Image: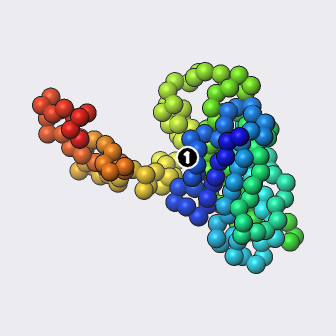
Amino acid sequence: MTNLTIDFNAVNPLLTGNAPGEIGENNAVTLTVIPETAMTENVEVVSYYIMFGTKDGVIPSAALPQSSEPLVLPLSDAVTKYKSLNVQLWAMNSDGAILMKSRMVHLFLKPSVAGEFVGDDSGTLLAQIAEFLNTHYSNAEIDMLLSGVLPAVTAADNGDFLCVVNGAWAKTTLNNAREVDYLGEL
């Protein structure tokens, strides 16, 4: 069984796992959701719903009682039916009204014979991610999603490259790419 943790208090809420499993799996992935502190400390919150956005629409979990403990449930085949899955946590009051919503987390499932997607029918993974982002977000929203992931850039950075330095992306320049073995010396 695969375990996947989403911590809505973290800068990057998706803490574990590259992918939450394969398309079409049933109860093969255990999802652990850690609610935002603002939700757990709000005395009006009595329950949570983990909302799953799929191609078929929004699929809610069963009502989960308010708790400061992580919320744990298996992912059913109803939510792993397609290659992408959106996850959001809703905090509810005693009247069933929505008090708060977490950020949306986007998950990409691995191809599987059990699901509707076998093979890569839409180009590279990078192309799929770019298409998804451009379909669902404005440029300003994409910039906000990537802030902190990639270094900030301006027109003064034209011609610079990204490379990994001490485990993080950093900008670098190449004085002359023909004279520098940039794959080995950055």
Other-residue count near label 1 (Cα within 10 Å), few / some / many at <14 / 14–19 / ≥20: few
Q: Which residue is rendered at x = 52% and y = 24% of the image? A: 123
Residue at the disc numbered 1:
137
Q: Which residue is rendered at x = 62% and y = 32% of the image? A: 110
Picture quadrant of residue 9:
bottom right
Above or below — where is 58 with respect to 93? above
Q: Residue furthest right?
A: 95
Q: Position of residue 79 (x, y in %)?
A: 76, 40
Residue type, numbered disc 1 = Tyr
Picture quadrant of residue 116:
top right
Q: Position of residue 109 (x, y in %)?
A: 64, 35
Number of marks in picture? 1
Q: Quadrant of the N terminus?
A: top right
Q: Is residue 116 visible?
A: no
Left/right of residue 25 with respect to residue 104 in the rendered view = right
Above or below — where is 132 with respect to 90? above
Above or below — where is 128 with respect to 158? above
Q: Residue furthest front?
A: 1
Q: Quadrant of the C terminus?
A: top left
In the foreground, 18 or 174: 18
In the foreground, 148 or 26: 26
Q: Position of residue 176 (x, y in %)?
A: 14, 35
Q: Is residue 100 visible?
A: yes
Left/right of residue 95 with respect to residue 105 in the rendered view = right
Question: Which structural element holds mark 1?
Answer: loop
Q: Which residue is rendered at x = 62% and y = 43% of the image? A: 107
Q: Which residue is rendered at x = 58% and y = 49% of the image? A: 16
Q: Position of residue 131 (x, y in %)?
A: 53, 35
- Colour mapping: rainbow
